[in-house]
Image (spheres, grey):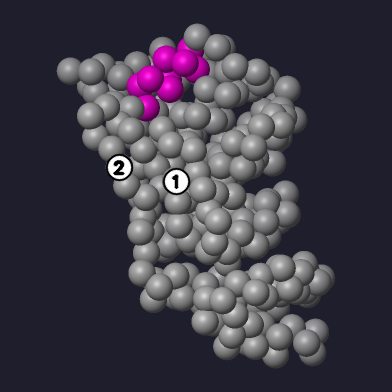
Amino acid sequence: DAEALYEELLKVHDGPFCNEDVIYSEFGSRLILAMSTVNPIAVVNCLFTVLFEKSIDSLKDNLKDDARRNVVRTLEKLCFCNDSFEKAALLMARLAIAENEGWANNARGQFLQLFHVALAGTESDFNARMNVLQKLHLGGDEYKPLLLDAIRGAFNHSNLVRTRGAEKFGFIEKLDFHPTWNQIYEYWNNLYNFLTKWVEKEPEITKEIADIVCYNTRMFIRSKRPELLFQFIEYLAPK
């Protein structure tokens, strides 16, 4: 069947489509985008293997124009599927720090959207998203600005929108993860813990964390979480 065929074509190391020449081409990347609807796991394994270890300069210089647009659209779809979410999100982050597009739905924009509390463009829950943040944090300083921007947006819960299309997998239409308020509050608590542990290891980012808190002050109050705001203030004030 088509799923088995695509798995062979995209097989890591010896699949004919699993190489940078195909991925960097407009035609090859368009075929991979089409395959992602049928076999997202094979596609994400292929893209992750070929692209994730590339240098930032290499990704900027070689993955561009229509090929890059196709790859970002592919990753957008792969991020929607829980089975391919983690690798797709990690690779989207890699492309985000190697950004060379000016569109709102470029790799950076799509990555930041993944951490919204609603209409995030994924069926994956908040625990899966925290795992991505943790892994990228371990990836080094080059991810720091991107992670801080993602967390800044994660505390927002109003006026959230996304472009439709990535949720469609053939005749199946996947649904965004729809959290309860308790799940959102737990997510925010986990982000608080993540940020305070980060400050303990790197006190120099205190001001950037304070900026995130200031930016989201109204959100904490409107969402009936003033105590979280006070927690941040009590923790950051003596720093």
- Who is closer to the viewer here, 110 or 98? 110
- Who is closer to the viewer here, 78 or 53? 78
> Outermost residue, left direction?
1
Label 1, label 2: how far apart the Cα atoms are: 10 Å
The residue located at (73%, 54%) in the rendering is 145
The residue located at (59%, 80%) in the rendering is 221
Verify whether residue 32 appears in magenta. Answer: yes
- Who is closer to the viewer here, 104 or 36? 104
For the record, the magenta segment spans 28-36
Above-or-below relation of 63 to 167: above
According to the image, label 1 marks what residue? 121
Left or right: where 138 falls relative to 207: left
Circle number at residue 42: none
SS category of the residue bearing label 1:
loop
Above-or-below relation of 137 to 233: above
Instruction: Give the quadrant of residue 215.
Output: bottom right
Verify whether residue 25 appears in magenta. Answer: no
Circle 2 packing at 10 Å, graded few (<14), some (14-19), many (20+), is some
Q: Magenta segment, principal secondary structure? A: helix
- Could you say where residue 117 lies in the image, as x and y percent from the top left? 48, 61
Residue type marked 2: Lys
Residue type marked 1: Gly
Instruction: Give the quadrant of residue 63.
Output: top right
Q: Earlier in the sequence, mark 1 or mark 2?
A: 1
Residue contact at pointers 1 and 2, CB within 8 angstroms:
no
According to the image, label 2 marks what residue? 174
- Could you say where residue 53 lies in the image, as x and y percent from the top left? 60, 35
The residue located at (73%, 22%) in the rendering is 61
